[in-house]
């Protein structure tokens, strides 16, 4: 599976493949046409409670990933399956709005898909 990550504020590229926004909240100041999305899967984003608890605190990252993986397993089976199907057919680009490119829900989601995708 080829799964890339791209911040919503980065320009889309022709080789991005299927672009899916995986945030619960629309990226501030970005128009729909600018993102060139195939889908917006806000339901696969971390719960509001988990997102608030994490608060993009780097020290909470390992526990955030663990909790988010649990949410994905318990609540988002059909969405996870859909993303895996897309990724098996070609490149999948998970689009996110967070400033931190290394510790955000799209990174965790990509890791989960790769870990469980085989």
Image: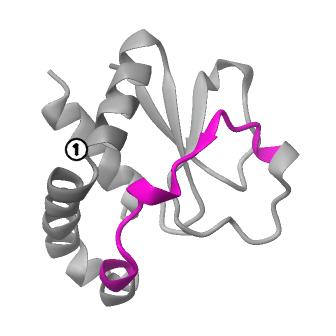
Is residue 3 one of those drawn in magenta? no
Residue farthest to the top? Answer: 89
Direction from residue 55 to residue 9 in the image, left or right? right
Q: What quarter of the picture does the C terminus occupy?
A: top left
Task: Identify residue for label 1.
Answer: 112
Is residue 39 one of those drawn in magenta? yes
113 to 118, vertically: above or below? below
Residue 36 place in picture, x, y as percent: 76, 37
* In the foreground, 113 or 11: 113
Disc 1, SS: helix
Residue 102 place in picture, x, y as percent: 39, 59
User: Residue at horizontal 41%, vertical 61%?
Assistant: 45
Quarter occupied by residue 37: top right
Direction from residue 90 to residue 77 in the image, left or right? left
Direction from residue 70 to residue 95 in the image, left or right? right
Residue 86 place in picture, x, y as percent: 44, 22
Q: What number of labels is visible? A: 1
Quarter occupied by residue 82: top left
User: Residue at horizontal 32%, vertical 49%?
Assistant: 109
How crowded pointer 1 is (Cα within 10 Å; few <14, some 14-19, many 20+) is rated as some
User: Residue at horizontal 22%, vertical 72%?
Assistant: 64
User: Residue at horizontal 13%, vertical 65%?
Assistant: 66
Q: What quarter of the picture does the N terminus occupy?
A: top left
* In the foreground, 103 or 90: 90
Magenta residues, as a range?
34-51
Direction from residue 34 to residue 82 in the image, left or right? left
101 to 50, vertically: above or below? above
95 to 105, vertically: above or below? above
Residue 40 place in picture, x, y as percent: 60, 48
């Amino acid at each position: 599976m080829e799964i890339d990550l791209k911040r919503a504020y980065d320009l889309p590229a022709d080789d991005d493949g299927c672009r899916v926004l995986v945030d619960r909240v629309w990226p501030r100041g970005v128009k729909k046409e600018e993102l060139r999305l195939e889908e917006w899967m806000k339901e696969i984003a971390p719960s509001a409670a988990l997102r608030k608890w994490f608060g993009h605190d780097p020290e909470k990252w390992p526990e955030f990933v663990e909790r988010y993986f649990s949410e994905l397993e318990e609540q988002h089976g059909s969405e996870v399956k859909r993303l895996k199907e897309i990724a098996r057919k070609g490149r999948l680009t998970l689009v996110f709005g967070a400033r931190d490119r290394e510790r955000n829900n799209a990174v965790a989601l990509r890791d989960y898909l790769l870990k469980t995708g085989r």
